[in-house]
Amino acid sequence: MSLFQNELTEYLQKTDSKDMLSLYHAVSEAAMKQAKPTWNKPRTRKTACYFSAEFLIGRMIYANLLNLGVLPELQQLFLQSGLDPNMFEGVEDAALGNGGLGRLAACFLDSAATQEIPLDGYGIRYKYGLFKQYFKEGFQQETADDWTQFGDPWSVRKEKEKVRVDFADQSVWAVPYDMPVIGYGGKCVNTLRLWQAEAMHAFDLTSFNDMRCNDAFGAQIAAESISSVLYPNDETQEGKRLRLKQQYFFVSASLQSILRQFKAVHGNNFSKLPQQYAIQLNDTHPAVAIPELLRILMGKENLTLDEAFPIVQDTFAYTNHTIMAEALEKWDVSLFCSVIPEVYAYVVMLQNKLKLDLHGKGITGGAQACYHLIDENHRIHMARMAIYATHSTNGVAALHTEILKHDALKEWYAVYPERFSNKTNGITQRRWLGLCNPEYAGFISERIGNGWLTDLSQLKKLEPYVNDAHSLRQFVEIKRRNKERLAGHVHLYEYGMQLNIDSIFDVQIKRLHEYKRQLMNAFSILDIYFQLKDGKLPNFYPMTFLFGAKAAPGYYQAKGIIKYINEIAKLVNNDPDMKDRLAVVFVQNYNVSYAEKLIPAADISEQISTAGTEASGTGNMKLMLNGAVTLGTYDGANIEIVQQAGEENNYIFGARVEDIRGAADNYNPKAIYHANAHIKRVLDSLIDGTFSDGGTNWFRNIFNSILEGTSWHRPDQYYLLLDFESYVEAKLLANRDYQDSMSFAKKCLQNTANAGTFSSDRTIRQYAEDIWQL
């Protein structure tokens, strides 16, 4: 009997309290005790540190129990005690991230611990994670997500290890909360350290008693606001200031923590720092760590720039997640100096050193402008800094990396080609198959063993079963049961909506952004609806379209798209002609736990970003792994998915990167609109009274942005109309193919069998070997 089982059995025997919350804490504490001895083992190897503004962890309890190997024990104990093993599904879901970036960070931590690679995460312990979403009359509404409302048994506050972080207008304590990151099998436990901002001084009771409430609460509120909310709205200067404060807060605290550990062993011999620590910058959010480390080494430890810069460069590496200019962070110098003026001096030093280095490579005068860290408009370019002052820049899918090298960052690649590499993203199969789809996981293990849990390449052994009729029938039955489970959840949480489990489940779940083209999906659904009403699709197989997405609170175009999809859903779902033929559901508050129900039930995975805009994607990998076919563009990791599983087993459509480059200068969406009756009909629905946007004018703005453009982008920036016809054709082809259930099941099983390369275990090994030299 394990320590976990002993602890839990003793608890169940001695307490009469069987309520969900006390059981949750008891189970969590028993698991923490089981993990503690391994967690406390001292490190003797070089450590990698993952700096990320987001860690989209999701529900921790079941994943940790699975990795400790005690989940079956819990299930057995609960069943023996007459308890529901799934009772913790509503307890916690740590949404400390926005989407793929944060979920990738969580997968990397899981994979590193499983591979026994010493990798610790560093970020912010947001009091409120990504907002909770609900719909009111089809509009997105946001409420605070207090993810610790039931307590946080998985975090350990390390009061003695708090550090001070200074800004121009305040100083705060950064207090670390450590979470164990338990590898599969429990042989390695790494750490996720999240920082919480607190006031330097205790609450001023005297001021409060004198009714000077502003004095009593002011400093406390100002400090705590830094770690209050994930991604505060940055439409205002104050919002931008708070974002910069958040970024500096966690990297400064993390660097102080790392250097304290380093000095305890190596003293002031900082030349050894890159031999002991590798720091990976997850996108540009933590890039301010570069001048901050320079400031500490030079301003506090008295190194010269010539001594400090090689240490900084050899310690840091940078992952780029986007080619879109608007997503590559830039800070106005005036704002930067109003928040962290001491750090700015080191940005200037980096700028001057860069100029000298470029001059030494024969790049002089005006030719240097595209490299400047501080441009002529007095903006600091964080991506440029991250490329210049690190030893490695990697993309996250093969196409993305090629675009970085030969287009988006070509001037940097020309100067530092040796620094660029590709590390295609991955996902952890423990959570995204073993945990979320246990029946399918059992189906796989019955045929090939369970070695795939730590070596996903073993899935290739499934290929012989693609032609096994019994296996295909069993696959179809499992998929149907997963649809039943999802349908039950949707019925409970989505206004009593009844899903037709005998329909095709077409799923698009991801952050709401124009380049991800949820709007094009909506247009296609409306076109299919009109065709069905006109009697033009006589052999159409029933389809249920499922969306899950949150729009940033200040992103009104995205909010307009959500409202539009919900208007389409209202039209379709209330039309008696569509009963059991067509349905549209936009699920509320899409998060990791909802994804764990949607993904196993999906037949079709919508991955329809404009070619050249999606760096990689990881949702596409999760859906592929769980036996869904990809309906997508030749973009991001879709390319590698079809290379692995075969284009014949997926549905690729639309313009490719080279097509878009060729068409860009002469692209005329208005001409397509007037020439194509299908496109005109669906686009006109935005303005002809078919749907109401509640007087916001959002639908008119969407219509105009496609045909007229806006002040910040050209008409139909993401080529919805260019790809529309081929997209609808591909969707209807998938519909026809699905009607041969065994043939479609073969495609699905081929996708699972060829998903082996998309494990984050593989990705993290590549980082460890090629970048961190662990």
Image (cartoon, rainbow, N blue to C red):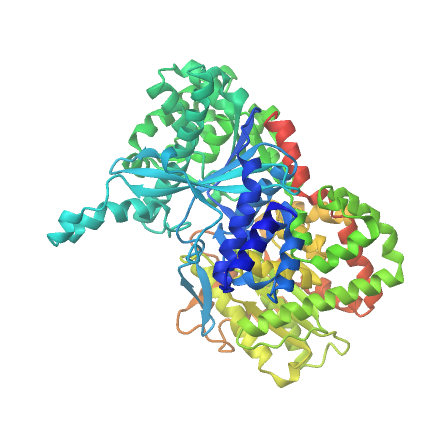
Q: Is 469 positioned to the left or the right of 335 in the image?
A: right
Q: 100 or 399, which lies in front?
A: 100
Q: Picture coordinates of residue 698 (x, y %)?
A: 44, 66
Question: Which residue occupies 85% across, 56% down?
Answer: 466
Q: How many marks?
A: 0
Question: Which residue occupies 74% across, 74% down?
Answer: 541
Q: Picture coordinates of residue 457 (x, y %)?
A: 76, 42
Query: Which residue is at the far bottom?
Result: 576
Q: Picture coordinates of residue 238 (x, y %)?
A: 30, 47
Question: Which residue occupies 33% across, 35% down?
Answer: 333
Residue 620 in sight from this viewpoint? no
Q: 357 or 483, which lies in front?
A: 483
123 lies above or below 46: below
Quarter location, residue 255: top left
Quarter location, residue 89: bottom right
412 lies above or below 575: above
Residue 310 in sight from this viewpoint? yes
Picture quarter with the C terminus: top right
Q: 79 or 89, which lies in front?
A: 79
Q: Picture coordinates of residue 656 (x, y %)?
A: 67, 49
Q: 275 or 631, which lies in front?
A: 275
31 lies above or below 286: below
Q: Is 346 positioned to the left or the right of 66 in the image?
A: left
